[in-house]
Every structure is written in C-alpha cells, then in structure tokens.
Amino acid sequence: MLRLTKKADYGLMALKYLAEQTDGSARSAKDIAEAYHIPPQLLAKILQTLAKTGLLVSHAGANGGYALSRPAKEISAFEVIRAIDGPLFITSCITIHGACDLTSTCTIKEPLRKVNDSIKDLLSGIHIADLVDADGEQGGTGAPVGGGLVSIAI
Amino acid sequence: MLRLTKKADYGLMALKYLAEQTDGSARSAKDIAEAYHIPPQLLAKILQTLAKTGLLVSHAGANGGYALSRPAKEISAFEVIRAIDGPLFITSCITIHGACDLTSTCTIKEPLRKVNDSIKDLLSGIHIADLVDADGEQGGTGAPVGGGLVSIAI
DNA sequence: CTAAGTAGGACTGGATTTGTCTGAATTTGT
DNA sequence: ACAAATTCAGACAAATCCAGTCCTACTTAG
C-alpha cells in the first residue's frame, strides 16, 4: 500500500552494513554491493547522494570508500529515506507548498497530513543502530522461506 | 517519501462524499466526479473496485449509483486504500509471500515490517466518518485523527 | 423501448524507477 | 611519476507503473 523505493531500501541496507564495521575504516561501494548482491553502479549513486546530504563521509582514492558521519544511533530511517527519495508525501495533494490543486474541492488533505506526520514520527524513531540490533534475533530464524507460513498480506 | 496513489485519494474523497449523503439514496459516479472535478471514467473504475470488495453497494440502471455498505464510522482508511491500491508493502522485500529475493542478504526486512504494521494500525484507526468531521475545521486543531502515539518496538 | 446507470476489458501516453554507460577527478601505493 | 582504486557527475536506456480514455457490454427504472 505504501511503497518505499528500492533505492531507499538499498540505502538502508548499506548504512546498516557500514554501522556494522566497528573499526572506523571506510568501505567501498563495490564491497557493499557485493555483500548484498545489489547493482554496484546503482548503489554507488545512492551512496553519493547520501554523502552529499551529509549522512556519510566519503573518501576517494585507493582504500577509499564511505563511512557513517555519525553514530548509527543518531541516524534515523527517516533521514535516509528523505535523502534518497526526497520529500515526497503520502498524498499527491500535499505538496511542498502545502497547497492542493483542488484546494477547495479536496477536503481530505488535512486528516491525511496528520497521517503523514505520524509516519514521519514513526520513521524518525527508528535508527540504523536498531537495524543492526534486530539482526540475528529474527523471530523465525529466517528459515521459513519455503515453508509458506509467514506474513499475512495485510 | 511514502506515496498514496491518486486513485486511493479519489476513493477516499468519494467515500467521504457518500458518507455526507444523509438520506440513504445512491449517488452516481458522475455526480461525485463532478463534485470534486475528477475524471468521471477513472472514478467509475475506482467505485467499481470498491463495490467489488464490498465497501460500497452498487445499483445499476437509471437512478442507480453507489452507497456505503456500512456506517461511515466502520469503514477505515486502511480498508479503502488496500482495496484500491492492493496489498502493497513499504519495502519491495516484503511481498505477499513474505519472502525477499535476497532473503539471506537483506537483513532489514524484519524491522521494516514492523513499520509497515504500524502504518497499517495508523490507517486502521482512521475512518471515513473522521474525514467528514474534520471537514470545515481546517485549522487543523481538533481533528480526531489517531492520537499520534503509535509506538513501535523493534 | 430507452435513457441512465454500472461492469469490465484494452489501450495509450506519460511519469517514475531501476539500472547502465562513460568520462572525469581524487587519492594511495609503489 | 605512474598506475590502480575509488568517488563524482551526468546522460541515457529499459522496464515498470499510473492516470486517464475508449469502447462495448449488461441492468434497471420509467
């Protein structure tokens, strides 16, 4: 129902990967891409924009790469998503200027704006560090792949 | 950041419109489309799917149209959105089968699934009746839209 | 019977996403 | 100084998805 782009997904995965590198050394886009089997050039782009927005610090040259600019605890999923996907909104009504094409006719935007804010709060409360913690303690051992039980498609 | 399709938007607007009709009489797709200046044929399609999922009751023929199948208080925004946009998920990882292409590599899906659930809860708490109530008091003050708390524990 | 409706499939144009290619600029190691 | 590894930047191609239109049925009140 509400979709995050793959780029945002990849970005979160990459940040998580970087958060797991305890030594402060940088990792290259290629390394990360290989670790998760995602298209290297695409990830490169994503990391570039992440660096441009200040969430990552980059270092060119041999042995260069990317590293988190802040502790993983202080980087929220919301920041990452906004950096990659831009300031999109739940409804097309709600633009950056807050105005709706159908200002007079569309009477729905105000309630939805609150939903939007709630989602924002929700994502702001999740940090990269949380992703790292949740790893490994997956309720289902991550195994039920073939098993077919799993998720209730809403 | 997270987007709702225009169809879902239109659907919510239409349901709100129908909720405002106090007499139980049905309204045609054309009427609603004109009221909100949205493409009639597109709205017709949306109402059809809404009828197919049981949120609306339809009545063909002259003087036909659509009406809510239940009180506006008992139709949640979540139901509407799911009916129109289908059971999509916040991340492309989480499919209907619950499996990720990168099952082993993508370690991010579990936390995001919780976000997904929280958003679902959020939208389930909003009903068509709330949209009607919120109308007119655009100040954004007392709209009874989900108290905002929605806590999430990862 | 006919006009006003719904039901539903096929299709188009455009936007968005996803991914690739190519050519730089920057740093490090030798 | 040079070569290799790497980031940076933009353009571009392919695929997918969305919005909107059209056309043809079927249904029912009058």
Image: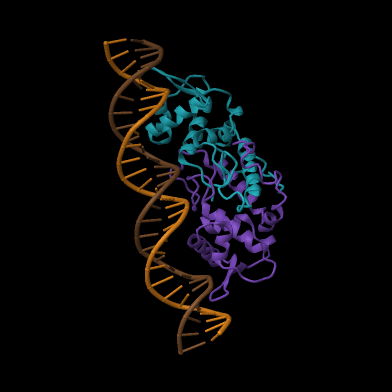
Chain colours: A purple, B cyan, C orange, D brown
- Residue A9 shows in the view: yes
Q: Position of residue B118 (x, y in %)?
A: 65, 42
Residue A146 lies left or right of residue C17; in this view the side is right
Q: Nearer the viewer, residue B104 or A69?
A: B104
- Residue A40 position in % (x across, y down): 50, 61
Q: Relative to B14, say whether B153 is above or below.
A: below
The percent position of residue C18, horizontal first and vertical second, equals 47, 53
Residue A132 appears left or right of A116:
right
Residue toward you, A112 or A35: A35
Query: Residue at the location (48% across, 48% down)?
Result: A99
- What is the x, y in percent for residue B116? 62, 44
Asked if one can make out residue A87 in the rendered structure from this viewpoint, the answer is: no
Q: Give the number of marks.
A: 0
Residue B36, located in which quarter of the rendered image? top left
Quarter residue C8 falls in: top left
The one nearer the camera, B125 or A113, is B125
Residue plotted at (71% across, 55% down): A133
